[in-house]
Image (spheres, helix red, strand yellow):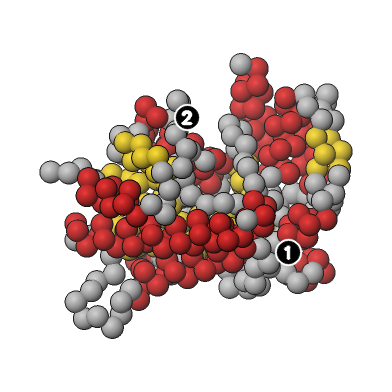
Amino acid sequence: MRKPVVLITGAGGEIGHGLIARLSESGSLIITLDISPLDASLAPLVTREFTGSINDLSLLERVLAEFEVDRVFHLAALLSTRSEFTPVTAHHVNVEGTLNLLEFAQHQGESHGRPVVFIYPSSIAAYGFPDLETKTRAGAVTEDQYAHPTTMYGCNKLYCEQLGHYYSRHYKQLSADVIARVDFRCVRFPGLISALTLPSGGTSDYAPEMIHAAAKGQPYDCFVRPDTTIPFMAMPDGVDALLTLAAAPRERLTRSAYNVSAFHPSAAEIRDVVLAAFPEGRIGYAIDQKRQGIVDSWPAAVDDSAARRDWGFDPKYNFERAFQEYLIPTIRQRYRK
Ligand code: SER
């Protein structure tokens, strides 16, 4: 008999690193799909590594034939800055790739007769304010407010939230003999900050880049204004959110997409904390007006009370703890090696 496995797409990325470690500690069998081979540190933790594209349907068919997947963490995507340079490719990967994975999950569910839990990271990029004044006035926004993204990535994420809901609740609703087999669950992540990896191609990257550069003793110019504010979360809490949502009883879930966040410092506040920890760091500002415009369209804070109420979301790291207990000690150790 085939054993149930977890499929992680984009497994070699920032979230994948933490997620693979946590899932393997808990004894789950993991298979991965990533466009690049996994790091040597991750490969031993997985049962099978597929290297290829989420748009390669024959590869997905092979996975379907060989494994019984009962959970999918679909992390593969091009982030927001990268997507603005190649919007058509972004759409191809972020939207068509997600459609392929939803179809894959439906077929998996049909083949083993149970719903496949499908975890999808959406983003604060799904929001879009017309101007800074509206952002400042709005404060912490709920999931259904200001969902008018200004980036290709944000459009992709918002649409895929809807697509997931469709596969979960309304798939082929007019066909009497079809049962929706996808149990779609989504978090809208804020900026994520990891001590172990650096993001590539995101617009919230100024925060992690500042920290890692200072720890390495390299000068860094922050590409947004000092007053720029968006929500953030430490990576362990991000991974925890995905696992907690995946394990939540379905009847407790009142929505498909949930805001989550932990703290929302300004760029200047992040700089201050980083320089207090690494006094030799040199952090200046060189504003990139276009990237600034993207971050100004994202909320300064989100209301994540639905996640706290429905599935017990409860991040461990506030701003101070994230830096003092996770980022600074872990990053110090990492660059000392
Ligand atoms: N961190 C992401 C980005 O900047 C937002 O989801 O693209």
Identified at 59% across, 66% down, the residue is: 155
**In this orientation, which residue lies closer to the viewer: 82 or 206?**
82
Image location (x, y in percent) of residue 55: 42, 54
Q: Quadrant of the C terminus?
A: top right
Between marks 1 and 2 in the image, the one whose residue lies nearer the viewer: 2
Task: Name the N-terminal-most of marks 1 and 2.
Answer: 2
Q: Residue 103: name its quadrant.
A: bottom left
Determine whether 277 is above or below 154 in the image: above
Side of 147 relative to 312 (left or right): right
Image location (x, y in percent) of residue 29: 30, 38
Q: Identify the amino acid type marked 1.
A: Ser
Crowdedness of circle 2 by 10 Å Cα count: few (<14), some, many (20+)?
A: few
Q: Identify the amino acid type marked 2.
A: Asp
Side of 270 relative to 167 (left or right): right
**In this orientation, which residue lies closer to the viewer: 45 or 50?**
50
Q: CA distance from mark 1 to mark 2?
A: 35 Å
Crowdedness of circle 1 by 10 Å Cα count: few (<14), some, many (20+)?
A: many
In this rendering, the count of numbered labels is 2
Identified at 24% across, 46% down, the residue is: 67
Identified at 52% across, 69% down, the residue is: 159
Number of the label disc, if any, that sits on residue 297: 1
Image location (x, y in percent) of residue 182: 32, 63
Side of 219 relative to 104 (left or right): right
**In this orientation, which residue lies closer to the viewer: 279 or 174?**
174
Q: Quick one: SS at disc 1?
A: loop
Q: Which residue is mark 2?
A: 39
Q: Is residue 97 visible?
A: yes
Does label 1 point to a residue whose CB lies under 8 Å from ligand 1? no
Q: Quadrant of the N terminus?
A: top left
